[in-house]
Image (cartoon, helix red, strand yellow):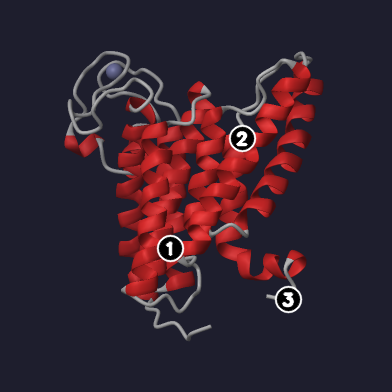
Amino acid sequence: MTSLNLSPLLSLPIFLLGAIVGSFLNVCIVRIPKGGSVVHPPSHCPGCKTAIRFYDNIPLLSYIALLGRCRACGEHISPRYFIVELLMASLAVILYYQFSFSLAFLVSFVFVAALIVISFIDLDVRIVPDVISLPGIIAGLLFSVVARYGINDPFELIPSPLNAIIGVLVGGGFLLALAWVYEAFTGVEGMGGGDIKLLAMIGAFLGWTSIPFTLLFASLTGSVIGIGFMIAKGVGRRFALPFAPFLCLGALLYLFFGNELIQFYLPER
Ligand SMILES: [Zn+2]
């Protein structure tokens, strides 16, 4: 582990940067499932279509100032906007304290942003968008090449290109096989194709060693919460729980604690 050159004074600008990026992620979460452009048209209220003024579009602050309502029509604004901005802002600061300004910071920042967009779209409309996961696979592989042949990664976060490729194959292939077996036995489509591409993306960014942990974590927490939900709400067995947020949370834990976690199942490493 290298000693970090950190400046606590930078926490605030990094928090603000994260909040601004979070604001853009909100636009992606709303517009990607509709197939629309994420830059045009400018933000507008989904209720009354009034264009949102710049001073009502300030990350975090505007939501608080407007008490979660549209200035023009008073329509309730989803707290998701605030949550996503706060989440990205907080994670940006945490990543800075973990990786300072480094290639690992940049890579994990991009990765975390992708995980947030995918999680909230899946929660919202039960889709894992290909437009994030497929370019994500390419990005993860490219970063591994940059770390191997360009900028050194002293944090050993970024896998070697070979590890990243195996990660894509293990993440994608293993789940594909599992989904095929499940469908063959039950006749019901189990895990969606989107979850499989997401796990391939996680493998590209974190290497194949992240896959067993991520999958185990997601399956366990997903089952517990799914069963709890079914008991509480009395919904049937066919209730579809979004799986991507659990995979993303597992990947996030691996991002921060992977080097420790790996000792459990690969002690010889
Ligand atoms: Zn409105």
In the image shown, does 78 or 231 lie closer to the viewer?
A: 231
In the image shown, does 168 or 242 lie closer to the viewer?
A: 168
Quadrant in the picture for residue 167? bottom right
Which numbered disc covers residue 268? 3
Q: CA distance from mark 1 to mark 3?
A: 33 Å
Which numbered disc covers residue 93? 1
Q: Is 43 situated left or right of 157 in this image?
A: left
Which numbered disc covers residue 176? 2
Q: Nearer the viewer, mark 1 or mark 3?
A: 3
Amino acid beneath label 1 = Val
Point out residue 195 in the picture as x, y percentages from the top left corner.
Answer: 56, 35
Amino acid beneath label 3 = Glu
Quadrant in the picture for residue 117? top left
Q: CA distance from mark 2 to mark 1?
A: 36 Å
Residue drawn at (72%, 29%), measured in percent from left and top?
181
Residue drawn at (62%, 33%), measured in percent from left and top?
243
Asked if residue 244 can be seen in this view, the reply is: yes
In the image shown, does 58 or 226 lie closer to the viewer?
A: 226
Point out residue 29 in the picture as x, y percentages from the top left corner.
Answer: 39, 32
